[in-house]
Image (tube, rainbow, N blue to C red):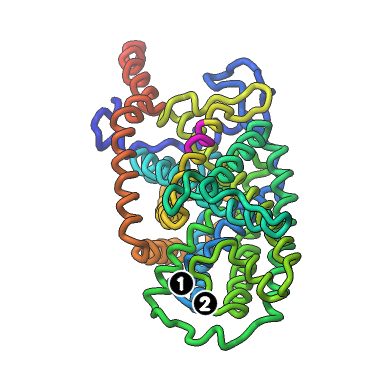
């Protein structure tokens, strides 16, 4: 019989075999091929290798926070922000191991949403999907906002002109809207519509530039390192360290972004876990070194309200404009690549939810020519552009952290559930120290969630209300699993008669 009670619908799970079967057509059929076996002949294409996938993780993580989060995190923790980065990195590391196992066992698009659908049920999966959409959309908006700061810094140093204040910030304090942020989102969406292969190649090149720029900052900043800037080390107490770590955590969104590419990766069971671990190691090392160098080069009180902070530190150290100009150019390129990856991740979450019937099918439509979800990408661009143009940066970062931490917790729990329900499922990677590591990962995520500001939970509550309304108003009736159950219920009497 069909599971027609609300509780049964909320708990129904999508079989891992069904998730993988939907993705297997990525190589098997050419674009535009006729439908076979009830599946569309147009599929996402497997074109991403290990370096390109690692670049997605590094690209969406390095810079998501380090280019501007110091200016909001340092005033909360003082020099102990270095400890905040360590706490955030440990939490991300524990979760990365869980992501690596889930990605190797379920190598499909959708990331945490797809993993939750296979392990915890449709209700949890839908809420996680909404959290991911909030996480990616708000993160992309926050990044686009910071792009305007570095663009103005470069223009000021290069030609002595800046974009007028009215057009370079969210409404308030004399601003109308953030025009550079809108332009950035439009350029990113145009590139993504052209094709994934082109996008990841551009991103890989930008990531190489980004790493060089951060190494340049570390090298110059360490020449002005003053140990006195690290004392007192924890002026705002352990509470400040927790608040800063919670805010910083959104910058580790890149680990989730890697797994959104599951259906477009070559040899995914091996490539996905390797890329996640490589991304984590590179990102953690650079984050801690940049934070240490920056705090050592400048008193922590100066970070508050400082725009294009890292570029300004270089200018203050050298007394010349060229190092800051080079860094500003690097930041402009870097932030472009971050926005590219984060918007890419959001479109793949929408694609997976549309394919499952959780959202309108139009979100899962792919272009026969490019194999990309064009309508989906345009819709994401409009939403992200609106947030970037009209919402202040400090409001965006914490909201992203909440969505990221919820998604990471669900993945860690999913590892335990999948080990118990499908112990023989092929896995390219297994979490060491199971089940302690997943449980500790959840504990760290909860610890960071409790450190978020109160208004962040208000935004989360609004997102939850929206999720519940959409699920019960649309998704519960249009879910593919609902249709499959109804078909099974209709066919069962006929089968019994034959018997």
Q: Main secondary structure of the magenta part?
A: helix
Q: Residue at x 29, y 35 (%)?
A: 469
Q: CA distance from mark 2 to mark 1?
A: 7 Å
Q: Which mark is residue 75?
A: 1
Q: Quadrant of the N terminus?
A: top left
Judge left or right: residue 386 versus residue 182: left
Q: Position of residue 319 (x, y in %)?
A: 71, 74
In x, y percent, where is residue 118? 44, 41
Specify few, some or many for label 2: CA neighbours under 10 Å numbering under 14, 14-19, or 20 or more.
many
User: What residue is rendered at 51% in x and 87% in y?
Assistant: 231
Q: Secondary structure at mark 2?
A: helix
Magenta stretch: includes residue 254: no
The quarter of the picture where residue 499 lies is top left
On the image, the x and y values in percent for residue 375 come to 54, 27
Above-or-below relation of 231 to 106: below
**Bounds of the magenta segment:** 379-383
Q: Nearer the viewer, residue 486 or 407?
A: 407
Image coordinates for residue 194, horizontal then vertical, percent: 68, 31
The reply to whether dot 2 and dot 1 touch (C-beta < 8 Å) is yes
Residue 286, picture quadrant: bottom right
Q: Earlier in the sequence, mark 2 or mark 1?
A: 1
Residue on which disc 2 sits? 300
Answer few, some or many: residues within 10 Å of disc 1's Cα (few below 14, many 20 plus, some between 14 and 19): many
Q: Who is closer to the viewer here, 26 or 260?
A: 260
User: Can residue 413 be seen from the camera position used here?
Assistant: no
């Amino acid at each position: 019989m069909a599971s027609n009670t609300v509780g049964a619908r909320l708990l129904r799970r999508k079989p891992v075999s069904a998730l993988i079967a939907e993705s297997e057509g990525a190589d098997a059929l050419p674009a535009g091929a006729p439908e076979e076996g009830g599946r569309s002949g147009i599929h996402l294409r497997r074109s991403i290798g290990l370096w390109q996938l690692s670049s997605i993780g590094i690209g969406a993580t390095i810079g998501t926070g380090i280019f501007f989060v110091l200016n909001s995190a340092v005033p909360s923790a003082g020099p102990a922000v270095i400890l905040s980065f360590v706490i955030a990195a440990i939490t991300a590391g524990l979760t990365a191991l869980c992501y690596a196992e889930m990605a190797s066992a379920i190598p499909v698009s959708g990331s945490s949403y797809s993993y939750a659908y296979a392990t915890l049920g449709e209700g949890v999966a839908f809420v996680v999907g909404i959290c991911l959409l909030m996480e990616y959309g708000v993160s992309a908006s926050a990044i686009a906002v910071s792009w305007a700061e570095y663009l103005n810094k470069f223009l000021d140093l290069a030609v002595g002109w800046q974009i007028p204040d009215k057009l370079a910030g969210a409404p308030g304090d004399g601003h109308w809207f953030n025009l550079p942020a809108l332009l950035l989102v439009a350029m990113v969406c145009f590139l993504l519509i052209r094709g994934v292969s082109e996008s990841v190649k551009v991103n890989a090149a930008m990531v190489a530039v980004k790493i060089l720029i951060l190494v340049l900052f570390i090298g110059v900043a360490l020449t002005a390192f003053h140990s006195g800037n690290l004392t007192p080390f924890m002026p705002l107490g352990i509470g400040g360290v927790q608040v800063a770590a919670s805010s910083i955590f959104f910058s580790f969104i890149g680990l989730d972004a890697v797994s959104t590419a599951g259906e477009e990766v070559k040899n995914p069971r091996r490539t996905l876990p390797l890329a996640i671990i490589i991304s984590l190691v590179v990102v953690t090392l650079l984050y801690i070194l940049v934070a240490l160098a920056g705090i050592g080069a400048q008193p922590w009180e100066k970070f508050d309200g400082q725009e294009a902070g890292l570029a300004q530190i270089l200018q203050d150290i050298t007394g010349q404009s060229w190092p800051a100009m080079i860094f500003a150019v690097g930041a402009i390129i870097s932030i472009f690549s971050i926005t590219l990856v984060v918007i890419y991740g959001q479109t793949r979450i929408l694609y997976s939810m549309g394919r499952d019937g959780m959202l309108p099918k139009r979100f899962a439509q792919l272009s026969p020519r490019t194999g990309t979800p064009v309508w989906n990408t345009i819709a994401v661009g409009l939403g992200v552009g609106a947030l970037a143009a009209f919402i202040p940066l400090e409001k965006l970062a914490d909201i992203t952290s909440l969505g990221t931490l919820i998604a990471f917790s669900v993945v860690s729990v999913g590892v335990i559930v999948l080990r118990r329900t499908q112990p023989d499922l092929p896995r390219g990677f297994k979490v060491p120290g199971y089940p302690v590591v997943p449980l500790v990962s959840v504990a760290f995520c909860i610890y960071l969630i409790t450190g978020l500001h109160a208004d962040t939970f208000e935004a989360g509550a609004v997102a939850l209300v929206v999720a519940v309304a959409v699920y019960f108003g649309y998704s519960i009736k249009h879910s593919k699993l609902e249709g499959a159950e109804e078909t099974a219920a209709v066919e069962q009497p006929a089968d019994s008669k034959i018997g």
